[in-house]
Amino acid sequence: MLTAVEVRDFVNIAHARLPLPAAGFCALTGETGVGKSLLIDALSAALGLKLRRRLLRKGAETAEVALSFDLAGAVGALNLLKRHGLAAPGGELVARRVIDAQGRSRAYVNGSLVGVGQLAEIVGGLVAVCGQNEHVRLKQAARRRELLDMAAKALPDAALVAARHAEHQQAAARLQAAEEAAAQDAERLAELQEELAELDALGFAAEAWEEQNRLLTQQENMAEIGELRRELDAALDELGTRLAQAQEQGKRLATLLPAAEGVGEDLAALNALAADAARALAKLGEGLGEVDRAALEEAEAYVAEALRLARKHRLPDPTGLPQLRADKAAELEELGGGDVEALRKAAAAAVASWQEAATILSKKRQAAAPKLAKQVQDSLRQLGMPAARFAIELPAAEGVARTGAEDVAFGFAARKQGKLGDLGEVASGGELSRLTLALFSHAGGDGARAMVFDEVDAGISGKTAAHVGSLLASLGAERLVLCVTHLPQVAAAAASHWLVRADEDGLASFELIEGAAREEEIARMLAGKKITAASRSNAKEILATAAG
């Protein structure tokens, strides 16, 4: 339970400490502008809510708000403190927030520095705040969903659906990007496939490259040897014929000229040498095989294709072809359909995951909607609207929605006849105030140990105000209900009453009033600044009726 609120240097509050009862309706009243709602702002700051304006009192360096709780029996809150390592003896909890002139703040739980988000997690569920703009927020679809989910105890489920939706959005975005890239790169894909087909057809390997080059060189050498042998054999044959003729002519010359006998002998020796050379050449040819034309053509084709591909891809030599092929294959895999298909499966899985979470959320909403609608309608009767009708509809949402498989619509009619209309369009200001109170009473404060209302009674008066006070009092039977009000009928229903005043310097003070002082404040609320005997008499009557 919330046991005290303490505020220092917060706007026009120099210092105030309000001890609070464990349960009961507690009213805060005072003239306009004295700082009643500032106390609610301060309390909200200590709950970790967003700071929306300059909050320091003039001349102060920091503002500070502290909330004290007694968590005896609050197992969930005690376990939460223990999990964060912030538990204190006796089940006490002190939540504090310090704000500087630049709007920066520090948060503390039981004296330990914590993040503002951590502060909100720890104390946010202990106090439910219904602010001045709650009836405006009630027109917003997001607030209606939130109230229903609070009543259904489905806020964690709604958060999970939102998280699954975000995962689906990411998966869908990745898939779309991949599909667009694949479409844009279709030409490149075809080019890569063609290039890889060429490289695979060659099947280049360093060992094969060396072997084919060796074989090609060998076959080329054998071909040249054979050609040279043929040419040399023909030359020796022709030389032998000429030498034989020359030798015969030398013999005839020697018969005619004895001095030329040596020439004939030299010619005979030359002829013998030529014959020896021819025989040696023939014998050399016996040890050489024939040129393998098929092997030679295969080696020539392999080497030529390797050189062509190296030139095509601007490589210094064909030894870089294996790495080129690996790079091309990697690029193809990155651009190819494999990734798209995997991303398509991931997107489908994300939809299924969202659907699973959304189905659980839908079941909780469907179970809670009629129950909450009946509770609100019953409360409206207590608030002076006996003919009012209220319903919660859950029309299907389109696609994979962040907020679940259905929207949440509040239908309202102030009379028994006619169709229900959208609450935000057909309800008057006073009706919205009562609807806000009824909804927040049954949904917004579910599970909270304290409920805070800031001028939720706007736009109503008279008998309706008395009904509002009665409802707030009934809510206070099991918890603390703190309400800022301008209506004497509402304030009269409170079990305790704080009066807020402002001094000549505009600084606010808070006084717990009862008896004659309370009668005087109720009279002021009835009559304004000029309090009369009649207003005092009316004040006593209102208080007596409320005590009743």
Image (cartoon, rainbow, N blue to C red):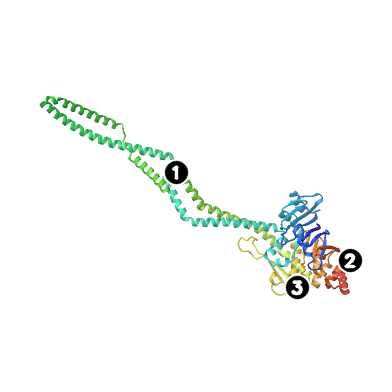
Q: Position of residue 389 (x, y in %)?
A: 73, 70
Count residues near mark 2 (Cα–Cα under 10 Å), then give few for <14, some for 14-19, many for 20+.
few
Check disc 1 and report its element: helix, strand or loop. helix
**Residue type, numbered disc 2:** Gly
**Gap in Å between the C-alphas at discs 3 and 1?**
88 Å
Q: Is residue 302 left or right of residue 249?
A: right
Residue 305 versus residue 225 in the image, above or below: below
Q: Mark 1 is on which residue type?
A: Gly
Q: Residues within 10 Å of mark 1 (few under 14, many from 20)?
A: some
Q: Position of residue 254 (x, y in %)?
A: 12, 26
Q: What is the total number of numbered labels drawn onto the structure image?
A: 3
Camera-side residue of 439 and 265: 265
User: For the point 22% across and 30% down, which residue is it?
Assistant: 274
- Considering the image in quadrants, where does the C terminus appear? bottom right
Q: Nearer the viewer, residue 488 or 511?
A: 511
Q: Residues within 10 Å of mark 3 (few under 14, many from 20)?
A: few
**Which quadrant would the N terminus be assigned to in this image?**
bottom right
Label 2 sits on residue: 515
Local secondary structure at mark 2: helix
Please name the residue that numbered disc 1 is placed on. 320
From the image, tell me which residue sits under label 3. 387
